Amino acid sequence: MEKLRYERPVIKKLETNMPNKFGLRTEYVAKTHIDGVAVKDLIKDHGSPVFVISEETIRKTYRQAKKAFTTRYPKVQFAWSYKTNYLGAVCRTFHQEGSWAEVVSGFEYDKALNNGVEGNKIIFNGPDKTDEDLKKAIKNGSLIHIDHLDELYSVIELAETMSTKPRVAIRINMDTGIYPMWDRFGFNYENGQAWDALNKIMRNKNLELVGLHCHIGTFMLTAQAYGTAAYKMADLALGIKKKYKHDIKYIDMGGGFASKNTLKGSYLPGADTNPTFDDFAEAITSALINSNFEPDNLPLLILETGRALIDDAGFLVGTVISNKRSSLGKRTTIIDVGVNILFTSFWYEHKVTPAQPFTQYTEDTTLYGPLCMNIDVVRESANLPLLNKGDHFVIHSVGAYNMTQWMQFITLRPAVVMIDKNSKAHVIREKETIDNITLMEKVPEHLEEFEL
Ligand SMILES: *Cc1c(COP(=O)(O)O)cnc(C)c1O
């Protein structure tokens, strides 16, 4: 055991009325290991900072979500949202668990094919599908979720020249009581756009309408909005059945479940307040079961859950560069993790835990990243024990959207490591080198030489 550390005593004013407006102290124990691997070894072996993904947490979270739905509804299928985290090892973990792929660009589509996902298990969403993309998706029997009429017309034209019948669905946007409403994607339910598109599809003998899709928002903090959405989706499906005697095969409720992260400005931690998988599942499946589908002929329920399945499995481990005091005396700590690799720090108050034992004193601290840019603030104010130069820390719940939205800016992007169930750490993305970055640059001949 390490010898207890001495820290100088400080005199602090006691606040007897309101709790601290930055919330209560949450750090009581150091996070010295992730899934049995010492943080200091991860840094020693892979550099600092380094992203760390827990394979076991992905599987555990996925199984929890799946159970919440399959215990309430007979036919459920998850499809992994590639844009949330499209590292090959992460996607394949979800595919091993039984997830299909959900993609929103030609690039992501090819990534899913490269990962070995069969074409008919790829859901193709998004407003930007080129004719080349569409042709490939039609040929492979993928599920094409049409976003706008121009895309529908392209699919109709392509279908005339191709021997395979496109399997299509439309994306529907609607009022679910959440404002501002997401109405830029797909066809509106309330104003009749959705019916207009559905009639165009049903009256065209070359297309097969297989499903209905919606994705009502992201980081949704109320489960009931999904109940409203599912009710409206069921209404459309039943309308198609009545008018055309056509059964749609699935209702896809998209993604958007909040993870356990804490949004900036929240009073309480997200882990205590955000709805659970059970809350979302209850709202969606009750609406479907209580609608007028024949009990033996319920549509397949597809879920494209992204962030809520991966956020907790991701950690970002780093090192303290320096401490200083602001002009007003507040403690500021500079760390080697910047907003360029932790994009989500723009809207989350990420939990940060020291990776070595610490003493009892805490202080409101601003965490700055290493960039020479004023916007590089990882936490405005976190109640933290003193971190010294060279100390390590762990930033929690960073699995979603950081490893796809990160920017190569000022510094190189770090390695990503996945820890398996036997506590073995595998590099799943190498850290960048200057050669990776300059590989695609070209210098015109007349600029090659200079004298200073
Ligand atoms: C981004 C996206 C998802 C995943 O959203 P999360 O908020 O990460 O759950 C699912 N479906 C579609 C169409 C998306 O664009």
Image: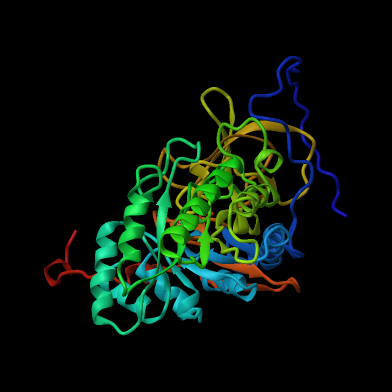
The residue under the point 52% across, 65% down is 250
Answer with left or right where residue 367 lies relative to residue 32. Answer: left
Residue 316 seen from this side: no
Question: How many marks overall?
Answer: 0
Answer with left or right where residue 240 lies relative to residue 392. Answer: left
Q: Is residue 452 above or below residue 206?
A: above
Nearest the viewer among 106 and 416 is 106
Answer with left or right where residue 172 lies relative to residue 325. Answer: left
> Which quarter shows the N terminus?
bottom right
Q: Is residue 264 above or below residue 59?
A: above
Nearest the viewer among 426 and 221 is 221
Residue 394 position, x and y percent, is: 65, 52
Quadrant of the image occupied by residue 434: bottom left
The residue under the point 72% across, 33% down is 362
Q: Given the current orientation, which residue lies at the most extreme bottom position?
A: 163
Residue 236 seen from this side: yes
> Which quarter shows the C terminus?
bottom left
Quadrant of the image occupied by residue 420: bottom right
Nearest the viewer among 430 and 246 is 246
